[in-house]
Image: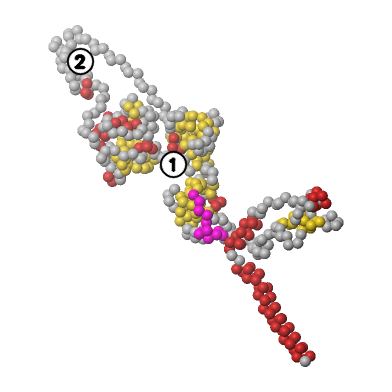
């Protein structure tokens, strides 16, 4: 009997040991499984918590009055002891409690395993994106390129395909942002990934040393490169500006001759200095013809040889000029390119005068304005505006009267001169260097576009 009881105890012990082992061993492996299969969300949350920890909570102590005998009845959750101390009652569950001079907070995250995420770098010592592009945060904001020789990548990785390049200070639109890379779109519609450190919320200026002149009346000098900023001064036309920086080909950072600093819009300035106006010549008085003692003959005719013999042998009147003397608008054949050229030829020799558009003085765009005005066709008096007016034609299709738009200050990319095509590779234009309207070769500079104003 005693032997059977001993055998049964041995079997029970073996079964108990097997059950405990079966339960305990998997539980010992749970942390390993959690370490290997912890969700990405938890890992990212832990990394964020470590990177941006909450501010330390101010230590909270129970004042003496809170545990003295008179106030223990007020603190219903505490039980009073004979020695005057207090402790929590049984079966009372609270989130925080007072222990050894400080409050302890129970955390529901205490049992969750934590992990640390480390930033890795490629062979160029540039950060590798931690997030998948599908998890990038969508945004829509205007930023500026702050680094030189910046490239757009097909993926947020320097080893991926290069899809384009962006100049420093160029404006881009950020479409999505990750941990170290962003998806951006250029003004030309190119999309690609770029490092976050290459982007700036503020406008980026490239340093330059350039002198320009105001090309508009009442140009506003701003305190910042924004039309919403304060006006420092209103500038008159032809004011000279020393440029120390340019941003996005849109704003100049300038300094006036008196030391005043500010920002102006690029499109309202010109690179060429205004010419010194040519003084208008004083007209000479018409000489009084001398009378012949033998009686004057008949006056001169239309030709330059003057009149015939007088009745009593005296010579006739003085030389008569073409068309009776003095230059008049030439006859035109209709609203066509030939008429434009005829009018332009009649302006040859007219003195150059900046902003002029008459026979008293004229500049390059003023000549175009004047010639087309005679045909009833309005044209804007500004080279950069003419660049976008009318219709564009190819070089091989050029006709009489078409307007050639030049960039003589290459590589600035701005229209700063215009001329009228007169045939055989020749143009007629108002030259500031020669000081008058002259003939020229159509390839005298970089042609930006050819415009036609007559269909």
For label 1, the crowd category at 10 Å Cα-Cα, with few meaning under 14, some 14 to 19 and many 20 or more, is few
Label 2 secondary element:
loop
User: Reading the chain from its start, which is encountered first: label 1 or label 2?
Assistant: 2
Alpha-carbon neighbours of circle 2 within 10 Å: few (<14), some, or many (≥20)? many
Q: Quadrant of residue 24?
A: bottom right
Which residue does the image show at 50% across and 48% down from the upper left? Answer: 141
* Residue 412 badge: 1
Residues tagged 1 and 2 counted as in contact (Cβ below 8 A): no
Q: Nearer the viewer, residue 271 or 25?
A: 25
Q: Residue at x 32, y 18 (%)?
A: 283
The residue identified by callout 2 is: 317
**Position of residue 22 measured from the top left corner of the image (x, y, whole percent):** 67, 78
- Which type of secondary structure does the marked residue at label 1 adopt? loop
Residue 370, percent from left and from top: 31, 30
In this orientation, which residue lies closer to the viewer: 222 or 249? 222
- For this orientation, the residue located farthest to the front is 73
């Amino acid at each position: 009997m005693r032997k059977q009881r001993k055998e049964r105890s041995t079997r029970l012990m073996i079964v108990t040991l097997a059950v405990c082992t079966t339960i305990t061993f998997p539980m010992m492996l749970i942390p390993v499984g959690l370490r290997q299969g912890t969700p990405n969300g938890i890992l990212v949350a832990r990394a964020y918590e470590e990177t941006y920890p909450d501010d330390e909570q101010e230590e909270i102590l129970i004042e003496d009055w809170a545990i003295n005998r008179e106030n223990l009845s007020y603190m219903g959750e505490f039980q009073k002891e004979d020695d005057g101390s207090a402790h929590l009652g049984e079966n009372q569950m609270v989130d925080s409690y007072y222990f050894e001079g400080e409050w302890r907070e129970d955390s529901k995250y205490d049992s969750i395993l934590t992990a640390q995420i480390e930033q890795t770098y490629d062979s160029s010592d540039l950060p590798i994106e931690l997030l998948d592009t599908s998890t990038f945060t969508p945004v829509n904001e205007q930023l500026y390129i702050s680094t030189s020789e910046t490239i757009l990548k097909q993926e947020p990785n320097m080893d991926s395909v290069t899809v384009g390049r962006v100049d420093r200070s160029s404006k881009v639109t950020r479409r999505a942002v990750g941990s170290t890379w962003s998806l951006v779109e250029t003004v030309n519609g190119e999309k690609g990934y770029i490092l976050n450190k290459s982007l700036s919320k503020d406008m980026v200026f490239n340093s330059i040393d350039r002198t320009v002149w105001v090309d508009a009346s009442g140009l506003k000098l701003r305190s910042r490169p924004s039309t919403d900023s304060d006006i420092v001064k209103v500038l008159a036309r032809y004011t000279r500006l020393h440029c120390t920086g340019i941003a996005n080909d849109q704003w100049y950072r300038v300094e006036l001759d008196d030391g005043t600093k500010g920002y102006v819009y690029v499109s309202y300035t010109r690179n060429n200095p205004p010419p010194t106006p040519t003084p208008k010549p004083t007209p000479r008085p018409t000489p009084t013809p001398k009378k012949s003692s033998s009686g004057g003959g008949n006056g001169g005719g239309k030709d330059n040889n003057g009149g015939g013999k007088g009745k009593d042998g005296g010579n006739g009147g003085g030389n008569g000029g073409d068309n009776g003397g003095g230059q008049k608008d030439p006859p035109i054949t209709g609203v066509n390119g030939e008429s434009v050229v005829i009018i332009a030829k009649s302006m040859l020799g007219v003195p150059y005068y900046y902003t002029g558009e008459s026979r008293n003085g004229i500049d390059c765009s003023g000549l175009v304005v004047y010639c087309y005005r005679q045909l009833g066709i309005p044209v804007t008096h500004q080279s950069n505006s003419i660049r976008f007016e009318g219709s564009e034609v190819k070089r091989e299709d050029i006709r009489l009267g078409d307007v050639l738009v030049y960039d003589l200050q290459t590589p600035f990319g701005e229209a700063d001169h215009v001329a009228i095509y007169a045939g055989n590779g020749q143009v007629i234009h108002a030259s500031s260097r020669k000081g008058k309207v002259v003939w020229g070769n159509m390839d005298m500079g970089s042609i930006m576009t050819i415009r036609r104003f007559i269909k």
